[in-house]
Image (cartoon, rainbow, N blue to C red):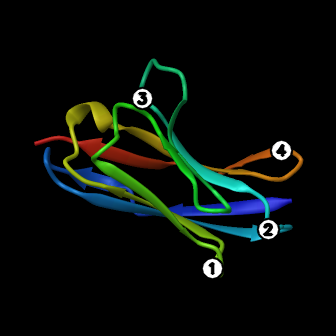
Amino acid sequence: QVQLVESGGGLVQPGGSLRLSCEASGSIFSMNVMGWYRQAPGKERALVAVIFSHGGTNYASSVKGRFTISRDNALNTVYLQMNSLKSEDTAVYYCNFRDFNMRDYWGQGTQVTVSS
């Protein structure tokens, strides 16, 4: 089992920045993928960004150039630096951990609201 604890959401004005963090604990092995997904009201949960244990990344086209995903393997923590935030970035952001058996674990979600 893997537990995920997220932090860093909140209210920010358009053009502002936020940093999300997610710490994993439990049965963690070296080969895994960590990432962030988001779900806006009335929409499906969608990929924002993922980072592999070897450091490779993948981003949704809507956030490329504005968001940066990173991880600290020693702390089992993944970060999402979000810059130039737009109103359409408003959503609940979920941390995801996928283990080497392709099993998914999810955080409880953190609200990000971009509004003036």
Q: Position of residue 63 (x, y in %)?
A: 34, 39
Q: Position of residue 110 (x, y in %)?
A: 47, 51
Q: Is residue 20 above or below residue 95?
A: below
Q: Is residue 78 left or right of residue 106?
A: left
- Distance (Cα) linking label 4 and label 2: 14 Å
Q: Is residue 14 above or below residue 7?
A: above
- Dot placed on the residue nearer the N-terminal end, 3 or 1: 3
Label 1, on which residue? 75
Q: Which residue appears at 29% of the width and 46% of the height? A: 65
Q: Is residue 36 visible?
A: yes
Q: How many callouts does the rendering have?
A: 4
Q: Is residue 94 visible?
A: no
Label 4, on which residue? 103
Q: Nearer the viewer, residue 11 or 14?
A: 14
Q: Is residue 6 left or right of residue 15?
A: right
Label 3, on which residue? 40
- Dot placed on the residue nearer the N-terminal end, 2 or 1: 2
Going by the numbered disc 4, the residue's amino acid type is Arg
Disc 4 is placed on an element classified as: loop
Disc 2 is placed on an element classified as: loop
Characterize the local packing of mark 4: few (<14), some (14-19) or many (20 or more) Cα atoms within 10 angstroms: few
Quarter holding the C terminus?
top left
- Distance (Cα) linking label 1 and label 4: 21 Å
